[in-house]
Amino acid sequence: MRLAILVILSTVAFASAGREQLLACLDEFPPYQVLSEPPIGEHVSALRQLGTELALEVEFVTEPNFNHCLKRLQQGSADVIAGILDREERRDYLHLLPMRHDTAYIFATRPDAAPINSYEDLHDRLIGVTEKVYYFEQFDQDESLQKVALNDVHLTYKLLLAGRVDTVISSLENLTAIYASDPELKDKILIQPFTHELNRVVYFGFSKHSIHAARLEQIRPKVEAAFAAGRFEAAIHQFAADHPQYYQVKPHKK
């Protein structure tokens, strides 16, 4: 709370100096959002790129979880959030502007696991999932599957390596970054044949109560041009390349 208040006070001082700012809400969700000082993460990098595209100074306010950030956007006490999916109820208070293409969801196992060739092969598996992530409707609503929810995708892979879960669902991008952090894991984590391709976009959510909402007709084309050119994705990939420690799933050797 103290950090949030300090950020808000600094934001007010910033605005009073006559410079435009963009207030983004973050919660702790590595590697997407890491509440260090200053904040870092995939979404933070995309938000900073957004500020560059719009010639706005990005400032951050923190909340204990994602839903608290959404409440801020509903109230207009924050301008933007990164990394959300299109949901009908969110359109009541958010303008959705494209950030990146979502990637395929893959199912990973240890190399000695029985193959997963179809959705039906997921039954009788203990599957590691990440809290607050929408995968795909059939999977999300299937109560017959055995799921173990954790707050970090890298913890699900740690449990996989430790033999605590049989299977992990994640984006291909997540596992690619994990492989990049430790190439030896390619011999210990197997991508199964069954995948779920996605044809959807991950968005920035702009509050309809933001002071910037009145300029949406000028903002949207700039954001869409940056999205089409892949500049937000490039910023995300650069973060992953610069911070391999956030993608490691094995403990450091002492």
Image (cartoon, rainbow, N blue to C red):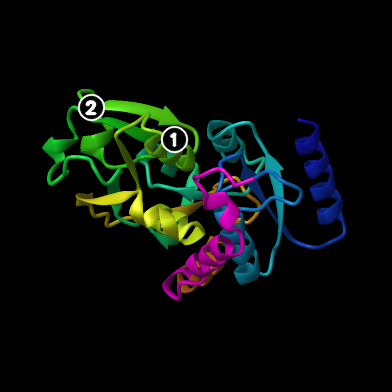
The residue lying at 51 percent from left, 58 percent from top is 181
Q: Looking at the image, which residue is at 23% across and 30% down?
A: 125
Left or right placement of residue 124 versus residue 8 in this view: left
Which of the two residues, 150 or 90, is positioned nearer the viewer here?
Answer: 150
Secondary-structure class at tag 2: loop
Residue 188 in the figure: left or right of residue 193: right
**Circle 1 — which element?**
loop
Horizontal and vertical percent for residue 186?
36, 56
Q: Amino acid at mark 1?
A: Lys
Q: Position of residue 120 (x, y in %)?
A: 12, 36
Q: Quadrant of residue 22?
A: bottom right
Q: Is residue 94 above or below residue 214?
A: above
The numbered disc on residue 43 is none
**Mark before the other along the chain sequence, 1 or 2:** 1
- Mark 2: amino acid: Leu
Quadrant where the C terminus lies?
A: top right
**Residue drawn at x 29%, y 55% as measured from the top left:** 104
Asked whether the viewer can see residue 202, the reply is no
User: Closest to the observer: 36 or 1?
Assistant: 36
Label 2 crowd bin: few (<14), some (14–19), many (20+), radius 10 Å = some
Q: Nearer the viewer, mark 1 or mark 2?
A: 2
Residue 69, image x, y percentages? 59, 37
Q: Which residue is mark 1?
A: 132
Look at 27% across and 57% down and name the residue there.
Answer: 199
Instruction: Report if residue 82 is visible in the image.
Output: yes
Q: Find residue 145 and name its label.
A: 2
Badge 1: residue crowd in 10 Å (few <14, some 14–19, many ≥20): some
Q: Position of residue 17 (x, y in %)?
A: 87, 59
Bounds of the magenta segment: 227-254
The stretch drawn in magenta includes residue 240 = yes
Q: Is residue 41 magenta?
A: no
Q: Residue furthest front?
A: 254
